[in-house]
C-alpha cells in the first residue's frame, strides 16, 4: 500500500512532497545513507554525526513520518533502520541515489567506533561470565533442541565436504559432530575463555582448528562449503555485515545456516547472556541475507520454550 494511502495523504503528489522534503536536508540524507546496512540508537547516531540529541531526534521524527525509517524496540531502547523500499518506486529511487554517494571518511570512522564499542561490550561479558553462561543458554535454547535441524539442513543440501566454519562454537559439541563429516573443521571466536572450553572438548580431533579472531577480520578468501552461526548473530555488532562477510568467505554453491531467536522482549538476556539484540524477525534476517547476495532460504521454526522461539534458515550461495 502506498504511503499516501497509509498516512491519509490526499494524493501521490502529497507523498512525493513529504518524502522529498524529508530527504532534502543534508543531515537527514546522511542518516538515511548510514542506515543502509545497520540499525543505530539515537545516542549512537548522535556520536556518528556529532549532533545534539534533541536535533537528532527531530530529524528521525521527520524521516519516520515520511515512512523512510522504521523503529525497532530493544527492551527499553529504540533502534532505527531504513524502511523497506520493496515495491515503492519513489523510495527505491531515492535510496538508490543515496547509496551512490559515499559517506565522509570521518562518519565512516565513527560508525566503526560504534561497532567497536558494541564488540568490546560483548567481549567483556564473555570474559567475565563464561562459567555461568552455559546454564543460562541451556535454559533459553539448549543445543540439543536445534543441532539435529542444523545437521539435517546441510546434509540435505548435497554439499562438498571439504571445509566448514562455525562462528562462536561454544563448548565445541557441534564442531565434534561436524568433524565426522568434513575434512577440515574450523571454529572461530573472539573470546579466549570461550575457545578454552571448546579446546578441552575437542582434544585429539586432528581435523579441527580453533581460531581467536573477530569474524569480519577473516581474509576474504572463498574457502568454506558451509558456514554455521548458531545463536551468535544476536551478539554481533552489525548483523548485516555478518551476512556480507559470510558470503565473501564461502565457496560457490556453499550454504550458510543461521539458528537464531525470534524477536522477543526479555531484556534480562542482555545481562545474563550478553545479547546485543533481542532476537530478530525472520524478514530482518532474510533481508540482510538477500542484500548480501544469498538466495531465498529454507526455513524452520521450532516450538517455543521458556518464552523463546527458535528459527533456523539455510541460505544457499549461488555458483558464482
Image (cartoon, rainbow, N blue to C red):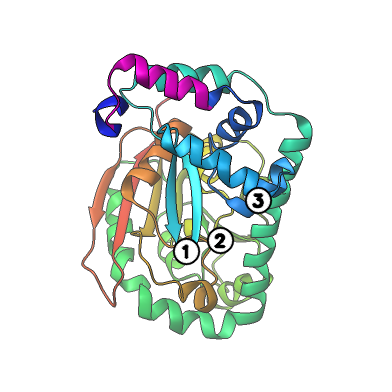
**Tag 2 near tag 3, CB within 8 Å:** no
**Label 3 element class:** helix
**Residue located beneath label 1 in the image:** 175
* Residue, far left: 303
Q: Of label 2 and label 3, which has the lower sequence position?
A: 3
**Residue located beneath label 3 in the image:** 53
Question: Which quadrant is the C terminus positioned in?
Answer: top left
Q: Of label 3 and label 1, which has the lower sequence position?
A: 3
Residue displayed at 51% across by 71% down: 270
**Label 1 element class:** helix
The image position of residue 63, as x and y in percent, is: 49, 35
3D distance between C-alphas at marks 2 and 3:
49 Å
Question: In terms of depth relative to the viewer, which is nearer, 48 or 55?
Answer: 55
**Tag 1 near tag 2, CB within 8 Å:** yes
Q: Nearer the viewer, mark 3 or mark 1?
A: 3
Q: How many marks?
A: 3
Question: In terms of depth relative to the viewer, which is nearer, 237 or 182?
Answer: 237
Q: Is residue 121 left or right of residue 208?
A: right
**Residue located beneath label 2 in the image:** 208
Q: Is residue 13 magenta?
A: yes
Residue 200 sits in which quadrant? bottom right
The image position of residue 67, as x and y in percent, is: 40, 33
Q: Is residue 164 visible?
A: no
Q: Note whether 319 is above or below 255 in the view shown.
A: above
Q: Is residue 211 left or right of residue 282?
A: right
Q: Check residue 190 in the rendering and tell me which mark sits there, or answer none.
A: none
Q: Which residues are magenta?
A: 8-22
Residue displayed at 73% across by 37% down: 107
Residue 11 sits in which quadrant? top left
Amino acid at each position: 500500500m502506498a504511503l499516501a494511502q497509509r498516512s491519509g495523504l490526499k494524493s501521490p503528489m502529497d507523498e512525493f512532497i513529504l518524502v522529498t522534503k524529508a530527504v532534502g536536508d543534508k543531515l537527514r540524507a546522511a542518516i538515511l545513507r548510514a542506515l543502509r546496512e545497520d540499525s543505530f540508537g539515537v545516542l549512537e547516531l548522535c556520536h556518528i554525526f556529532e549532533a545534539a540529541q534533541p536535533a537528532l531526534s527531530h530529524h528521525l521524527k521527520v524521516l519516520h513520518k515520511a515512512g523512510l525509517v522504521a523503529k525497532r524496540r530493544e527492551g527499553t531502547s529504540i533502534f532505527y533502520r531504513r524502511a523497506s523500499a520493496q515495491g515503492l518506486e519513489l523510495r527505491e529511487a531515492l535510496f538508490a541515489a543515496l547509496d551512490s554517494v559515499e559517506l565522509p571518511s570521518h562518519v565512516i570512522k565513527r560508525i566503526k567506533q560504534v561497532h567497536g564499542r558494541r564488540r568490546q561490550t560483548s567481549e567483556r561479558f564473555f570474559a567475565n561470565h563464561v562459567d555461568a553462561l552455559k546454564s543460562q543458554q541451556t535454559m533459553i535454547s539448549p543445543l540439543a533442541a536445534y543441532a539435529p535441524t542444523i545437521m539435517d539442513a546441510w546434509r540435505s543440501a548435497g554439499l562438498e565436504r571439504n571445509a566448514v566454519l562455525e562462528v562462536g562454537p561454544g563448548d565445541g559439541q557441534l564442531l565434534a559432530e561436524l568433524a565426522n563429516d568434513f575434512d577440515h573443521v574450523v571454529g572461530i571466536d573472539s573470546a579466549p575463555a570461550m575457545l578454552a572450553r571448546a579446546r578441552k572438548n575437542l582434544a585429539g580431533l586432528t581435523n579441527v582448528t580453533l581460531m581467536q579472531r573477530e569474524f569480519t577480520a577473516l581474509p576474504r578468501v572463498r574457502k568454506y562449503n558451509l558456514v554455521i552461526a548458531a545463536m551468535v548473530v544476536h551478539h554481533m555488532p552489525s548483523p548485516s555485515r555478518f551476512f556480507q562477510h559470510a558470503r565473501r568467505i564461502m565457496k560457490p554453491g556453499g550454504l550458510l545456516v543461521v539458528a537464531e531467536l525470534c524477536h522477543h522482549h526479555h531484556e534480562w538476556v542482555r545481562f545474563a547472556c550478553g545479547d546485543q539484540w533481542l532476537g530478530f524477525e525472520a524478514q530482518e534476517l532474510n533481508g540482510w541475507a538477500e542484500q548480501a547476495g544469498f538466495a531465498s532460504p529454507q526455513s524452520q521454526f521450532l516450538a517455543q520454550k521458556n518464552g523463546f522461539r527458535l528459527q533456523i534458515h539455510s541460505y544457499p550461495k549461488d555458483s558464482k
